[in-house]
């Protein structure tokens, strides 16, 4: 089939006329990997061990804004989703981040990561280090989940398909290059190594099964492209705020 690639990579309806099968849809979604934030220069330098302590601290403090917003984003998806089976599994994402009476969640693990890097917990919690680009990008993601159809919001979470490679590389890079960070602080990344594939498999199953029309498929690809933009602009904001 002939395709005309949109220059912004958003895979608009002009790309294709007809709906494709589930496997080809997965290929279209996976093709978005080239625009994932792992390709951003700040991440490339992070994993090469080239960032200063101030740059790592700036990244950790700003990323806390994203971590804190994830459960609110997932609650918005639950609120818009009429399907009990989907909700039954999706709800796990909220406790993974918020924790429970007996388990520590990702937000607490991220606060410990920050402390291990030398950012006091209260400085993360009060948001004093958050730069405007990060705040607006994160807000755009939560607003997207609140206002778009729930299936598109599920598709937008599929950046997590691309996350495990970056996480594994990051964990190795932190252990090798940033030895000034206490090892216990890296639990967040270790946990995500198994949580991210589990979550993205579920989201992919939903999108494969339910995005059957060309419009739904284009909307899913566009949602994923939007999310890549959210993550990329966060990195742009952090990169600019903490120069080498
Ligand atoms: O550090 C990263 O590179 C990274 C990327 C992503 C992602 O691809 O959206 C997530 C996370 N981390 C993460 O920790 C996380 O909990 C998470 C949830 C989601 C989501 O969209 O639901 N993405 C991500």
Image (cartoon, grey):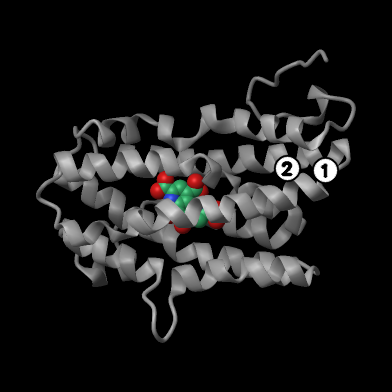
Image-based side of 212 in relation to 240, left or right: right
Dividing the picture into quarters, in which one does residue 243 lie? Answer: top left
Work out whether residue 130 can be spotted: no
Dividing the picture into quarters, in which one does residue 187 lie? Answer: bottom left
**Helix, strand or loop for disc 2:** helix
Image-based side of 122 in relation to 155, left or right: left
Crowding around mark 2 (Cα neighbors within 10 Å: few <14, some 14 to 19, many 20+) is many
Q: Please tell me which residue is depicted at 35% across the width and 42% down the height of the picture.
A: 168
Crowding around mark 1 (Cα neighbors within 10 Å: few <14, some 14 to 19, many 20+) is some
Q: Quadrant of the C terminus?
A: top left
**Extreme residue in the left direction:** 180
Q: Where does the image place residue 21, in percent across and percent down from the top left?
A: 82, 33
Q: Nearer the viewer, residue 18 or 140?
A: 18
114 w.r.t. 134: above or below: below
Q: Please tell me which residue is depicted at 69% across the width and 30% down the height of the picture.
A: 28
| Disc 2 to disc 1: CB gap under 8 Å | yes
Q: Where does the image place residue 31, in percent across and percent down from the top left?
A: 61, 28
What label sits on residue 14 in the rendered view? none
Q: Please tell me which residue is depicted at 15% across the width and 59% down the height of the picture.
A: 118
34 w.r.t. 173: above or below: above
Q: Please tell me which residue is depicted at 62% across the width and 37% down the height of the picture.
A: 225
Q: Nearer the viewer, residue 149 or 161?
A: 161
Q: Nearer the viewer, residue 110 or 89?
A: 89
What label sits on residue 216 in the rendered view? 1
**Helix, strand or loop for disc 1:** helix
Q: Quadrant of the N terminus?
A: top right
Dividing the picture into quarters, in which one does residue 144 lie? Answer: bottom right
Identify residue for label 2. 220
């Amino acid at each position: 089939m002939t395709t005309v690639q949109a220059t912004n990579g958003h895979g608009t309806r002009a790309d294709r006329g007809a709906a494709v099968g589930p496997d080809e849809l997965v290929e279209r979604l996976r093709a978005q990997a080239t625009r994932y934030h792992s390709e951003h220069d700040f991440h490339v330098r992070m994993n090469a061990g080239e960032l200063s302590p101030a740059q790592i601290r700036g990244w950790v403090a700003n990323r806390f804004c994203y971590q804190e917003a994830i459960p609110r984003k997932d609650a918005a998806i639950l609120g818009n989703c009429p399907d009990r089976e989907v909700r039954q599994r999706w709800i796990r994402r909220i406790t993974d981040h918020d924790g429970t009476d007996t388990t520590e969640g990702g937000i607490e693990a991220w606060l410990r990561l920050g402390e291990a890097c030398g950012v006091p917990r209260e400085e993360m919690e009060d948001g004093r280090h958050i730069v405007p680009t990060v705040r607006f990008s994160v807000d755009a993601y939560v607003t997207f989940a609140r206002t778009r159809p729930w299936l598109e919001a599920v598709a937008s979470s599929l950046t997590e398909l691309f996350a495990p490679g970056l996480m594994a590389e990051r964990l190795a890079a932190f252990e090798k290059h940033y030895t000034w960070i206490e090892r216990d602080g890296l639990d967040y990344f270790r946990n995500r190594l198994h949580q991210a594939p589990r979550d993205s498999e579920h989201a992919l199953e939903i999108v494969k099964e339910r995005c059957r029309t060309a419009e739904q498929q284009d909307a899913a690809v566009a949602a994923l492209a939007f999310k890549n933009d959210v993550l990329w602009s966060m990195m742009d904001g952090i990169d600019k705020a903490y120069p080498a």
